[in-house]
Amino acid sequence: MDFTYYNGPLTICSGSQYRVRLESKLRKLTGEKIIVGPLDASIKKCIESGKIDAGKGEVLLDIARFCDMSYMNPESDPPSRSTIIAWSDAIESI
């Protein structure tokens, strides 16, 4: 029997909530009206311009990758509670 893998609601909702919050902050930092596609380019632009330090940028890149994976990879697991708290703090601090 074949199994069909899919992400549960927690993974998909977490990914979309992080995406919305992070995209909103990045639009303010970059001055862009809309960001289409992965957030990596906008995060890297902010790191290169000095608006985000490199350490925090790496965390934000991890968050952006999770957002992308939660939509594209059907076998993504939701982040742990401690990761959720750390990522939320990282997004709110920019």
Image: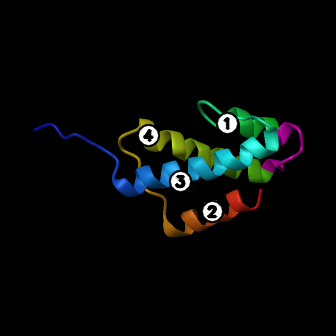
Q: In this rendering, does residue 83 appear at all?
A: yes
Label 3: how many Cα within 10 Å (few below 14, some 14–19, many 20+): few
Give me the residue at 44% from left, 53% from top.
Answer: 13
The quarter of the picture where residue 34 lies is top right
Mark 2 residue type: Ser
Amino acid of disc 4: Tyr
Q: Residue at x 55, y 63 (%)?
A: 84
Mark yes or no: residue 77 visible: no
Q: Residue furthest right?
A: 50
Q: Amino acid at mark 3?
A: Gln
User: Nearer the N terminus, badge 4 or badge 2?
Assistant: 4
Give the number of the mark in front: 2 or 3: 3
State the extent of the magenta-drawn residues as a range: 46-54
Relative image position of residue 38 (x, y in whole percent): 60, 34
Residue at 43%, 35% (x, y): give it. Answer: 72
Q: CA distance from mark 1 to mark 4?
A: 16 Å
| Residue that sits furthest to the front in the current view | 33
Q: Quadrant of residue 70?
A: top left
Measured as percent of width and height from the top left, residue 4 is found at 22, 40
Residue 17 is marked as 3
Quarter of the figure with the C terminus: bottom right
Q: Which mark is residue 40?
A: 1
Circle 2 residues within 10 Å: few <14, some 14–19, many ≥20: some
> Mark 2 sits on what residue?
88
Q: Earlier in the sequence, mark 2 or mark 1?
A: 1
Circle 1 sits in a helix, a strand or a loop, which is it?
A: helix
Question: In terms of sequence position, does the residue under pointer 1 or pointer 4 come before the other?
Answer: 1
Say left or right for 35 vs 8: right
Do labels 1 and 3 touch, CB within 8 Å? no
